[in-house]
Image (tube, rainbow, N blue to C red):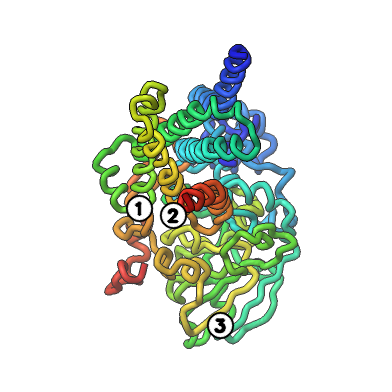
Amino acid sequence: MSMLVSLRRFAIFLLSMTPFFYLLQAVVRLQAGEWNILGPEPGRAIVFFSGSWTFNFLLITLMVTPLVRYAKQNWLMTHRRMLGLFTFFYATLHLLAYFAFLIEWRWQELGKEVIERPYLLVGMLAWLLLIPLTLTSTKNWQRRLKRNWKKLHQLVYLIGVLAAVHYLLQIRSSWFEPVLYTLILLLLLVPRIAGRKRL
Amino acid sequence: MIIRKHKRSDAQPSDITSHSSYLNRRQFLGQTAALSLAATALPAQAIQTHDTTRLQKPEWLAQQVAAAKESKWGKGESLTPYSNVTQYNNFYEFGTAKEDPYRYASKLKTDPWWVTVEGECEVTGRFALEDLLSQVDLEERIYRLRCVEAWSMVIPWIGFELSTLLKRFKPLSSAKYVEFTTLHDPKQMPGQRSAFSTIDWPYVEGLRIDEAMNPLTIMAVGLYGEVLPNQNGAPFRLVVPWKYGFKSIKSIVKIRFVESMPKTTWAQLAPNEYGFYANVNPEVDHPRWSQARERRLPSGLFKPNRIETQMFNGYEEEVASMYSGMNLRKFY
C-alpha cells in the first residue's frame, strides 16, 4: 500500500516537474546557440510560461477537495500538499524570471513599476501570501496550528482571486484565456464560499 | 502557446543579418555568376532570408521590388533578422498570438488587389494595385519600428512615399485627415471570425493630412528586398516610423480623405490607453506599462537588449515641427 503511494507520489512529482524540465532544456539550448528557440523575446516567453503553470497548479490544487468529496477520489488528498508546493515553486520561478529577464534586477525600476502597474502589485501580493502557506504546509505545523491551520490555508481562495485579477488586468484584446481561467477558478471557489455561509 | 519549436531553418546568433551582409546579399542575388563566391563569404542563413514556398509573388510586383533603389535611411542600423520580422507579428486579423499571423496568413489572396479611394478628393474610384504602383519608384527604407507593447525592430522596407500617391487623387482643402481600412474578409482572416476578439472589424487607422504627406511616411510593398509576406501586411501597407506600430495599418483596401478625425480602431477600443496620434514618446507612459525603454529584438535571455526609447522614435528632426505647441501628454 505505502509502496503504491510512494510510486504515485514519485509519478506526480515527475509530471509536475515536466514544465520546469521543458524550460530548462529550452534555456540550455538557447545558451548553446539556438537563439530563436523561445522566439525573439525569450525572457518574456519564460515569464508567461511559468505564470501559466502557476495558475494551472493553483487550479489543480483547488480541484483536489471537490474530487475527494464528490468523486470519492480519496487517494488524491495525500498529494494535495505537493501540488500546493508546486504552485509556490512555479510562482517563485515566475517572479524570479520577471526580476531576472524583464527588469534585470534594477530595484529602483522595480519599485516604480510595481507602484505604477497595479497588476504587478496584485501578483506580488499573491506570491507573498503563498509564503505562509508554504512554510506551514508540514504535518508538524498542521498539528501545531490545529483548527487555525485550516483557516490560514483558506487564504488560498484570496490568492486565487488575486491571481485572476493579476491576469485579467493584462487583457489587451483577447480575453479568452484570462476569462477561462477566472471562470474555472470561480467554479471551484463559489460552492465552497456559498457552502460555508449556510453553516 | 508561447514556446516555439526550433526549426533547422532558423538563423544562429552568429548569423543575425548585419546591414553589410544584407546589402551584399542583395547585390549577389542579382548576379548569379558571383553566387559561389559570395556564398563562401557569408553564413548561409544570413543569405537565405526568404522562404520562397510561402511568398506569393505576382511577377510584376516581384520585379518592381527587386529593382528598388537604396536610400539614406537607416544606414548603420543592425537589422532584426528576417525570421523575427516575419514570425513575430501583431496582425489580429489572423489571431492574437505573435506567431498566429505567420501560421494563418499564408492563405490570404493578395493578387489581384483593389484599393478604393473616396472622400474629399477630386479623383475617386476603385484602383488595381498594379495601376497604383505603375507610376512609382520603389526604394528601400530601413526604419525602426516601435510597438506600443515596448518592443522594437529594425526593418528594411521596400516602399514609396505616401505623399506621391495621395497627390494623384488631388485632395481638396477640406481633406484634413486620411483614413485607411484593412481588408475585412472573415473567410480568409480567422481572427475576424473569432468570437473572442473585442475588435470591431474592419481595422481602421488614420493620419492627419500633414502627417500623411510627411516624406518619412511610406507605403510598403516589400521587406528585405522581397515582396511583403502576408503576415507583414501584404500586399500594401502603411509605415509611419515615428508612431507606435499599430498606426502602420496592414493590407489596405480603402483610403478615404475626410474632414474630421477618423475613428481609429484602438483609440475606440481603449481611448484611455491608445490615442489617435500615438507618437512614440518615452515620457508618456501607457497606463499599464512604462514607455521609457524598449526591448530591441531579438533580445537575449541574460542580456536583454533593452534600450532607451527615443522621442518620436528618433525621428524628432523630421517630424517634431508638426506638433509644436501641442500638448503631447494630452494628445497621446
Q: In this view, does B226 lie to the left or right of A81?
A: right
Q: What residue type is labelled 2?
A: Leu
Residue B132, image x, y percentages: 65, 70
Q: Which label sits on residue B196?
A: none
Q: Both on one chain, marks 3 and 2?
A: no
Q: Both on one chain, marks 1 and 3?
A: no
Pointer 3 chain: B
How many numbered callouts? 3
Nearer to the camera, B151 or B72: B151
Instruction: Report the quarter where the N terminus of chain B lies.
Output: top right
At label 3, counting other C-alpha atoms closer than 10 Å, the crowd grade (few under 14, some 14-19, many 20 or more) is: some
Q: What residue type is labelled 1?
A: Pro
Nearer to the camera, A70 or B263: A70
Instruction: Report the quarter where the C terminus of chain B lies.
Output: bottom left
At label 1, counting other C-alpha atoms closer than 10 Å, the crowd grade (few under 14, some 14-19, many 20 or more) is: some
Q: A17 above or below A38?
A: above
Q: Which label sits on residue A118?
A: 1
